[in-house]
Image (spheres, helix red, strand yellow):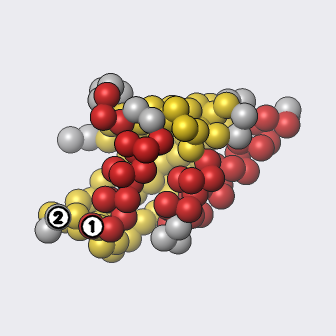
Amino acid sequence: MNATKTDNRAHLHELIEGITSGQLLDKFEKFYADDIVMSENGVDDPSRHGKEANRAYETYFVNNSQWHGVKVGPVIADGDHTAYEMWMDFTIDGQRVTRTQWAVQTWNDGQIVREVFYYGA
C-alpha cells in the first residue's frame, strides 16, 4: 500500500468522524481544496465550483438542519479516490429527509478536489 492511499484513507476517516460529530465545517476547511467541485448525482452545477461557493452551501446546511440519526456504511480508498456510504435522517427547512447516499472523492495532495454525492431522488 502506498503512502497516498494510506494518507487518503486516514483523511477520509477523519472527515467522516467530523461529519458525524458536528465538525463538518472544520473538516471542510482542512480537507477541501480551493478549487473543489462538488455535485449531486453527477450533475454539474456551476454554483458548486470553488471553496467559497461550497463553504456557503455547507454552512447553510449545517445551520439549518437538525439531525435525528446517521450511520456510516462501507468506506473505500484506492489511491487518490475514496468513497463512503452514509445513511442520514435529518430535517432541513421543515422537511424531514431520510437518505442513503454515497460520497465519492478525488484527492490531490491531501485535499479533496472533486466530490460527488449519489442518492435516489
Residue at disc 2, secondary structure: loop
Compared to residue 94, the image places residue 27 above or below, namely above
Q: Position of residue 44 (x, y in %)?
A: 32, 25
**Residue found 32% across the figure and 41% down from its top:** 119
Label 1, residues with CA under 10 Å away: few <14, some 14-19, many ≥20: few
Which is nearer the N-term, disc 2 or disc 1?
1
Labels 2 & 1 near each other (Cβ < 8 A): yes
Check disc 2 and report the residue beneath it.
Answer: 93
Q: Quadrant of residue 68?
A: bottom left
**Residue 89 numbered tag:** none
Check disc 1 and report the residue beneath it.
Answer: 64
Q: Position of residue 40 (x, y in %)?
A: 33, 36
Q: Position of residue 31 (x, y in %)?
A: 61, 48
Given residues 81 and 32, the one toward you in this image is 32
Q: Amino acid at mark 1?
A: Asn
**Residue found 36% across the figure and 64% down from its top:** 62
Residue at disc 1, secondary structure: helix
Q: Position of residue 64 (x, y in %)?
A: 27, 67
Whole-Å distance between the Cαs marked 2 and 1? 6 Å
* In this rendering, position of residue 65 left or right of residue 69: left
